[in-house]
Amino acid sequence: MSIILESSNAFLKDYLNNASPTGFESEGQKLWLKYIEPFVDESFIDNYGTAYGVINPGSDFRVMIEGHADEISWFVNYISPEGFLQVIRNGGSDHIIAPSKKVNIHTEKGYVKGVFGWPAIHTRHGEEANLSPKLDNIFIDVGAKNKEEVLEMGIHVGCVITYEDEMSILNNRYYVGRALDNRIGGFCIAEVARLLKENNVKLPFSLYVVNSVQEEIGLRGAEMIAHTIKPHVAIITDVTHDTHTPLMNKKKLGDVQSGLGPSVTYAPAVHNKLLKLIIQAAEDNNIPIQRQASSRMTGTDTDAIAYSNGGVPSALISLPLRYMHTTVEMANIEDVENVILLIYQSLLKIEHNHNFKYF
């Protein structure tokens, strides 16, 4: 039986379709906070936009579950006299997929529609036949006559740009859309809070349900909120690559496949005792898991949180994702449910002042 309710799916659709580019996450965070408020005792937002709710506040033992809210995007960097926009990245945006994509340029007047243009194949001959998108040759067309008209639209250097692609469900098996990395993580931790509330679970610690900002440009939101909350334990959720699609190298990227469950990571930042507890929770509750390793860093908020405050025992639970940083990211619905269950069951194993000392 699915643990994701119809109302949860409605929230997920609204949440994914709403734009939350790095540094401009406020509208998405408002949606997320409104959804979790019935399931938490307190809710807050910090100076840069990280949102969090607290269950059983006031305990001297603080546990954090965390995802990140921001999505990749672009900035307007230059407006040509003819009215075309040149861009720079805001996060890890992929220039290869940009041509022919529809976009929203965020202005104080609201969205302005535009497209990433590209010269027709008929016009490219000789050396130009193999012309490929590069950061310095992609451009946005907003249908303006010139630069002056662009400025009249409210567009200026520094405006942020997002793709307009929206969420769908493919073959009753996959969520598809932009920004599953990692608003799907924010969805998962919100669902954990819902399950705790609906099952009337009384936790022996304060639980902080945290949706961080600015992960895509250096884990900055997690860095800030970890110093605010000072957690004693942290479970982070993010996405990882499904390496069973074409052009993926399993020997380099690991062997992870959609539909086979969440992936747990072995890495220097991952605390071995906490990881063992999570694996035990999976085994005790018949939750399928996969395993992967990261040599120096996980590349997720785990790194920022684990190395804060003199060291916070932290672990990473990842959702296999196809086509990361595109507008057609795909996540298996059963994997999403199992991420939620694994975090939930892991929390039930943590005791007040749980001993996570190294040895």
Image (cartoon, rainbow, N blue to C red):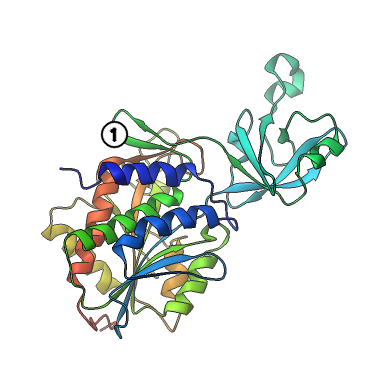
Above or below 38: residue 89: above
Image quadrant holding the N terminus, namely: top left
> What amino acid does circle 1 point to?
Arg
**Can residue 157 be seen in the rendering of this structure?**
yes
Could you tell me which secondary element the residue under label 1 belongs to?
A: loop
Residue at 31% x, 46% y is 8
Viewer-proximal residue, 228 or 321?
228
Q: Which quadrant of the view contains residue 346?
A: bottom left
Res 132 seen here: no
Residue at the (47%, 78%) spot, across then down: 228
Q: Is residue 279 left or right of residue 94?
A: left
Q: Residue furthest top?
A: 122
- The image quadrant of residue 230 is bottom left
Q: Residue at x 71, y 35 (%)?
A: 140
The answer to whether 65 is drawn above or below residue 105 in the figure is: below
Vertical order, 315 against 229 (above or below): above
Callout 1: 10 Å neighbours few (<14), some, many (20+)? some
Instruction: Determine whether 313 is above or below 189 in the image.
Output: below
Residue 340 percent coordinates (x, y): 27, 54
**How many numbered circles are shown?**
1
Q: Position of residue 315 (x, y in %)?
A: 33, 67
Which residue is tagged 1?
173
Which quarter of the image is occupied by the C terminus?
A: bottom left
